[in-house]
Amino acid sequence: MNIFLGYFVWGLILAAPLWWIWWRFNLSRWLPRWALPARSRPVVLPPQLDALVVRGKRRAGTGEARR
């Protein structure tokens, strides 16, 4: 367990400055498009779930009205 914790701590010590350098100099612009993370797409709910509250706002649906 001590060996694992030692490697874990050294990994954090090395990863934090490398991440900051990557972020600061925007090195991701040099990567090809296929290596970049995929952009998230909006979730489209089926009409049966139109009455759900999403992010605190009721979305207008095309389903039948509630009684």
Image (cartoon, rainbow, N blue to C red):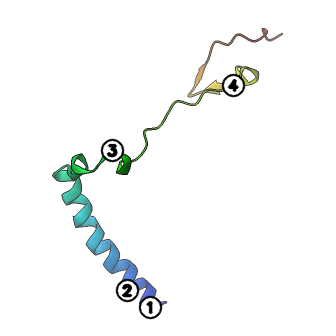
Residue type at mark 4 is Leu
In this rendering, would 49 be left or right of 1?
right
Return the disc, 1 or 4, that comes first in the chain's sequence: 1
The answer to which quarter of the image holds residue 7 is bottom left
User: Gap between marks 3 and 2, in whole Å?
Assistant: 36 Å
Q: Do residues under tags 1 and 2 come within 8 Å of each other at their CB atoms? A: yes
In the rendered image, the vertical position of residue 7 relative to residue 56, given as above or below: below
Q: State the SS at label 4.
A: loop
Residue assigned mark 3: 33
Residue type at mark 2 is Gly
In the rendered image, the vertical position of residue 16 relative to residue 13, given as above or below: above
Residue 43 in picture, x, y percent from top left:
58, 31
Residue type at mark 1 is Asn
In this rendering, would 44 be left or right of 42?
right
User: Gap between marks 4 and 2, in whole Å?
Assistant: 47 Å
Return the disc, 4 or 2, that comes first in the chain's sequence: 2
The answer to which quarter of the image holds residue 59 is top right
The residue drawn where x is 36% and y is 51% is 35
Q: Residues within 10 Å of mark 3 (few under 14, many from 20)?
A: few
Q: Nearer the viewer, mark 1 or mark 3?
A: 3
Name the outermost residue toward the bottom: 2
Return the disc, 4 or 3, that comes first in the chain's sequence: 3
Residue assigned mark 4: 52
Residue assigned mark 2: 6
Q: State the SS at label 2.
A: helix
Residue type at mark 3 is Arg
Return the disc, 1 or 3, that comes first in the chain's sequence: 1
User: Gap between marks 4 and 3, in whole Å?
Assistant: 36 Å
Label ID, residue 64 = none
Label ID, residue 2 = 1
In the foreground, 15 or 36: 36
In the foreground, 21 or 29: 29
